[in-house]
Amino acid sequence: MSLAQFVKNQGGFANLSISYKRGETLLAWAMISPWVAGFLLLTAFPMVASLALSFYKWNIISTPEYVGLANYHKLFFSDPLPMHSLKITVIFSLASIPLNIVFGLVIAMLLNTNIRGLAVFRTIYYLPAILSGVAVAILWQWIFSSDFGLLNTALRIFGIEGPAWLGSKIWVLPAFVIMRLWSVGGGMIIYLAGLQAIPTDLYEAAEIDGANWWQRIFRITLPMLSPTIFFQLITGVIFTMQIFTETFIMTNGGPANASLFYLLYLYRQAFQNFKMGYASALAWVFFLAILLLTIILFATAKFWVYYEAESEGDN
Amino acid sequence: MSSKGVGLSARQIISKIFVYAILAIGSIVILLPLQWMISTSLKPLSHVFRFPPEFWPREIVWQNYPDALTQLPFDLYFANTMFIVVLCLLGELIVSSVVAYAFSRLRWRGRNALFIVVLATMMLPRQVTLIPEFIVFRHLGMIDTFWPLILPSWFGNPFYIFLLRQYFLTHSRELDQAAVIDGCSRFGVFWRITMPMSKPVLGAVAIFSFQFHWNDFFRPLIFLLDQDKYTLALGLRFFQGTYGTEWNSLMAVSLVVMLPLIIVFFFAQKYFIQGVVFTGYK
């Protein structure tokens, strides 16, 4: 199902033959005018402006100097850091997003087994998902402390001497992945709602047909949840790639740039070095990278995302 | 589904115990960081660096809290944060609802096409537009004021427009039409019928907005310079830079900064969960 079709189907009365009323149209435009203004002033214009700026050299005080593709050339060929930071940002996302989805699904499935105390468990698991920002970053910096931190103290109970986490080039990315797993409850809530919406007669029919537990999971539960999972994947890519506060607070990109996520590098170029042209080029490359990832995911959707409406064949 | 009334088989009992055990262990793992935070915040500094670390404080020092919180003007940071958060929240609630109403309850040409633009902007990483935005606010002389943090909220937030639209679409159109026949204006329908009927989703938007602006760090970092204008997030970061290894004080202040959010969560959990469900579904 295309996005346009999705929007249209949801409109409800899209199929009626419509005669638009003039008064209603005018009122509608009046009502959406703040958004239109915001779109033009805060999205469309800045996007064009940042594209234009990316061909200039400008330190915000001097007059901008046109440099053609020099910023892009530097970004791809002479400055090693943009591609390095894009690479670690993608690696981090590729580890963090699927793990969050899998753990979120497993917890949701466990919660969806008619247990008592569902509300209590749901509250506990969901709580960390509402917390983020500087306070959480400081808390996890302390948890990852190699000698006095919670994680290594807990590992010592099992006789394991943990690494230096944030001080280790190898372990710093896994540390960020672990930290993000703490807020797995955000996705879990959504999967739980999705699970509760699956009609039980599907399972009853499967049981009569002799389907075992695994078959029910892989033939009913996961296909029915696939649109939800897909939505989580898309938003997950966009939000996870934008990791900034944690690295700014906990490691400032270190050690040896091992946690220099893309936005941290962009922030430094734009707001510490005031290289506005170069930073604009960085921003556009970031935007295109996310767009590319999103397009790839959308292209894979037809192989694994199941939409009920399509099989009913009524469109 | 099938367990009501009838006795459970041994296999069902074992699998139940298994499920509870995993959920309980998971809950402990989830709560442990918060326990660690509270425990550290109450220890004397000398005990924080005792090896091996203790899970429970041997000696409880409540004084850590007032001591830490008076090192910097956190009351001022709190007031600044509340000011920004409340104005952003009002803007997002009012404007996004008005816009969402036009996208769901009114019929006009181009409605669906424009809504796709709304969805597309929802997907846009804000950093692409940030640099020109910064330059514009600089030209307007608004750097180091609260305006760059508040104004964008009054242009409607695509994510909340999406949420509200989805909810408004579920209302029946007959009600609107009946009200119009009874002489209610179109805007009157929005204000007196649609809005009161949408309390759950409005609650969810309010809470998301509060949560986002309370936690926000990136934009205040860029637009605010003067320490008197700091938000709690900036103040906390400044505190960390100054008292970097006093982990008991750091944990105390961090916990206090998190607390309003945790309190709101416990009182309005219903709205949180409903809101998340509205979003994540389709």
Image (cartoon, coloured by chain):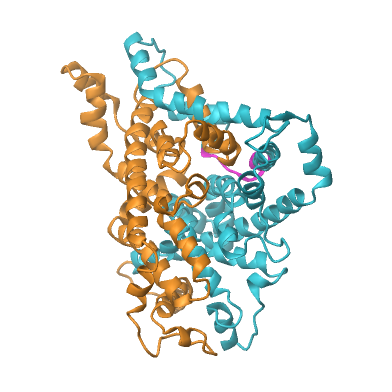
Chain colours: A cyan, B orange
Residue B161 image point, x, y percent: 41, 34
B157 vs A95, nearest the viewer:
B157
Residue A182 appears left or right of B146: right
- Image quadrant holding the N terminus of chain A, namely top right
Residue B189 appears in which quarter of the rendering?
A: top left
Residue B110 image point, x, y percent: 47, 17
The residues colored magenta run: A297-308
Residue at the spot 55% in from the left edge and 79% down from the top edge: A149
Q: Is residue A212 visible?
A: no
State the residue lying farthest toward the front: A62
State the residue lying farthest toward the right: A77
Name the magenta segment's main secondary structure. helix
For the image shown, how many numbered marks are present on the structure?
A: 0
Residue at the spot 46% in from the left edge and 65% down from the top edge: B239
- Above or below residue B167? Residue A135 is below
Residue A150 image point, x, y percent: 53, 79
Residue B19 image point, x, y percent: 46, 73
Residue A304 is inside the magenta segment? yes
- Above or below residue A23? Residue B2 is below
A20 vs A192, nearest the viewer:
A20
B71 vs B93, nearest the viewer:
B71
Q: Is residue B273 visible?
A: yes
B248 vs A298, nearest the viewer:
B248
Residue A109 is inside the magenta segment? no
